[in-house]
Image (cartoon, rainbow, N blue to C red):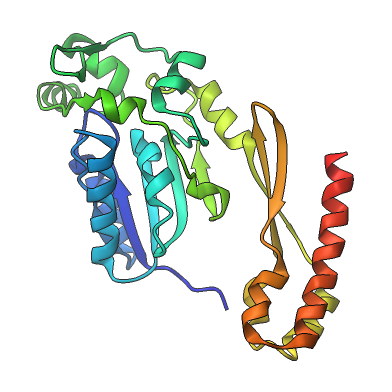
Amino acid sequence: MKQHVKNVVLVHGAFADGSGWKRVADILKNDGYKVSVAQPPETSYADDQKYTKAAIDAMGGPVVLVGHSYGGSIITEAGNHPNVAALVYIVAFALDEGESCASIETAVPQASRAFKPDSNGLWWIEEADFAADFAGDIPRDEAEFMAIAQVPISTDSFTHQVKNPAWKHKPIFYMVATEDRSINPEQERNHTSRIIRLVIGNPLIMKEMAKRVPDAGSYAPVTVLVDERADGVHISYDRMASLVAPYGDRDALNIARDLDAKVEDVLRQAAA
């Protein structure tokens, strides 16, 4: 049976802190979820990973990891933590291997032109543009306070290249904001179009396997990842045989290999 995860870790984006998640956290808590709001300092990508992983550890069990804007870059690597069950990107950077927030913004520029560096290697949003570009849907006085209380993001955080995207092997959800001025909505759609999962399976094969492997249902249906990259479309999935092998049941392993062969044939045809 699939586990119903009740722990949620929320990760904020650049120029802000975790307090921006308050209303979301309140809703989740009222619905019975245990919530932690991570506070990555934006001083370096390594620091942001450290603080986010600490929040995951503190939950003591499986979590859904949620990132907003730059927070998406953070959860893309932090999501490899073994306790992360799923990733949620809220108008966020879902980066691929070798990509950074900076490279994404260069490829498809955002609407805002108010991001400015200082002499300390930190980036800010100019106060005069903050409300319109960053907080256009909240009361003006709140937006003005956020402008003077903003948390600058380091150049290292913004330019760090992702090495191991967790979304390639964990369930993900993505929300696009059509009027976002910090990330171009076209780029957000690009993120979603290249991360596609297909669900396939043979119920007859699984019925036979379930006779030998008690929790075989946990491995079915099979999840296939369709990953669109600059060098073409890559198709992959986790082989059933690799999941069943530890049980030591030869008949179950043979059934799993039979399923793998059928899936691989379908994928080869699709790739062609």
User: Seen in the image, is 179 located left or right of residue 205?
Assistant: left
Q: Work out whether residue 108 can be spotted.
A: no
- Of residue 255 and residue 85, the one placed in the foreground of this image is 255
Q: Work out whether residue 155 can be spotted.
A: yes
User: Seen in the image, is 74 located left or right of residue 120?
Assistant: right
Image quadrant holding the N terminus, namely: bottom right
User: Seen in the image, is 34 located left or right of residue 78?
Assistant: left
- Residue located 62% across and 81% down the image: 246
Height in image: 157 above or below 78? above
- Residue located 22% across and 47% down the image: 22
- Of residue 96 and residue 68, the one placed in the foreground of this image is 96
- Of residue 242 and residue 200, the one placed in the foreground of this image is 242
The outermost residue toward the bottom is: 211
Count of residue discs: 0
Task: Give the image location of residue 182, x and y in percent.
Answer: 37, 21
- Residue located 64% across and 26% down the image: 230
Height in image: 102 above or below 176? above
Task: Give the image location of residue 227, x and y in percent.
Answer: 65, 40
- Residue located 73% across and 86% down the image: 210
Say which quarter of the image contains residue 272: top right
Task: Give the image location of residue 88, x and y in percent.
Answer: 45, 48
- Of residue 53 and residue 98, the one placed in the foreground of this image is 98
User: Seen in the image, is 30 located left or right of residue 194?
Assistant: left
Task: Give the image location of residue 262, x and y in percent.
Answer: 87, 62
Say which quarter of the image contains residue 58: bottom left
Height in image: 166 above or below 186? below
